[in-house]
Image (cartoon, coloured by chain):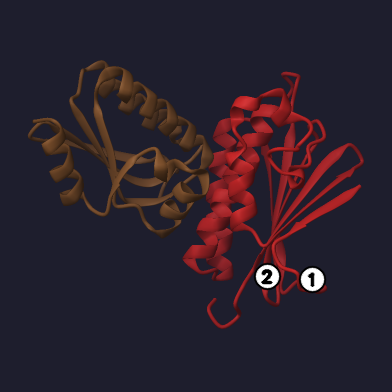
Chain colours: A red, B brown
Amino acid sequence: MTTTLSAASQPETEVHIEHPAQRLAIGNEQAEIARAADWLDRCSQAIGLRPELRTALQIALDEVLSNILKYAYTDAARHAIALSLSTGPALVVLEVIDDGMPFDPTLGPADAAGREVMLPQLGGHGLTIIARLMDEVTYARRDGQNHLTLRKNVDPHQT
Amino acid sequence: MTGYAVDIVESKVGQVVVMVLAGRLDSTSVRDFSARINAHFDAGTNALLMDMAHLAYITSASFRALALAHRRAKDCGTALALCGLNAIVNELFDLTGFSDSFEIYPNREAGLYALAKATV
């Protein structure tokens, strides 16, 4: 199952990876989110992303990971969350994979079945923020894992 | 920025406590932030100005903390205001509707002026 929330109506272009994907695996605890933010900052600087893009990605990643930590797992076991950052000719792609309970953030705060309905006090701000800051959000449930892909268009003349 | 903790420097100008936030107000640093705010409510602070001019960004975890602070400020009778929001922080305040809940001033001087009047 794959669903996509796209801010732009233009047809999706094939992603041609220019930089090798940067990867990180983190555990499902709060201190690991700080490590992920550190990783994202280093990768973004290495790629040469503009500060505004780095900030947008940092905010989106914090929203995604804090949501996973709070709502994805019902057991006390340690789980791995896989992150990757890659670039195309005019976009940057951040992918987050977790093995928590299914959750499709592209359904939106009001309609999302799953974590947010279980805990309505979340308020849905995180999903609203992600939708605003990213150009495209794609969700897929594959092999018992949530695959969330965040795409941000990059003006090649400004990087 | 190291460790992704938010730096908080506090000073008192007349009756107004000024809390200068620098760095990232995210799901990791929000605990420190909430602890500092609550310390001021517990101490009976009359007026609190959060200067966000040096804040890189804010995430929804911090909006929850701000919502709680707003409620406590009303309960405690503390005048609470924000100032110096950068473009992305301002955009997120508008997006989440928090712009309507808080007194927000362009800079510290304007915030201090308003809070000084409110606490006379």
Residue type pointed to by label 2: Leu
Q: CA distance from mark 2 to mark 1?
A: 8 Å
The percent position of residue B100, horizontal first and vertical second, equals 41, 42
Residue bearing the label numbered 1: A15
Q: Is residue A103 above or below residue A137?
A: above
Q: Residue at x 46, y 55 (%)?
A: B91
Q: Which mark is residue A91?
A: 2
- Mark 2–mark 1 contact, CB under 8 Å? yes
The percent position of residue A66, horizontal first and vertical second, equals 61, 36
If the image is split into quadrants, where does the C terminus of chain A sit?
A: bottom right
Q: Residue at x 54, y 64 (%)?
A: A53
State which tag comes first along the sequence, 2 or 1.
1
Residue B93 left/right relative to B110? right
Q: Chain of mark 2?
A: A
Q: Nearer the viewer, residue B119 or A97?
A: B119
The percent position of residue A155, horizontal first and vertical second, equals 60, 77
Q: Secondary structure at mark 2?
A: strand
Instruction: Classify residue A102 by image quadrant.
Output: top right
One can see residue B51 in this view: no
Q: Chain of mark 1?
A: A
Q: Residue at x 77, y 44 (%)?
A: A107
Q: Residue at x 74, y 36 (%)?
A: A80
Residue type pointed to by label 1: Val
The percent position of residue A64, horizontal first and vertical second, equals 65, 43
Callouts 2 and 1 in the same chain: yes
Local packing at callout 1 (Cα closer than 10 Å; few below 14, some 14-19, many 20+) is some
Instruction: Classify residue B31 by image quadrant.
Output: top left
Residue B47 left/right relative to A137? left
Q: Nearer the viewer, residue B90 or B8?
A: B90
Residue B92 left/right relative to A90? left
Q: Secondary structure at mark 1?
A: loop
Q: Is residue B44 above or below residue A91?
A: above
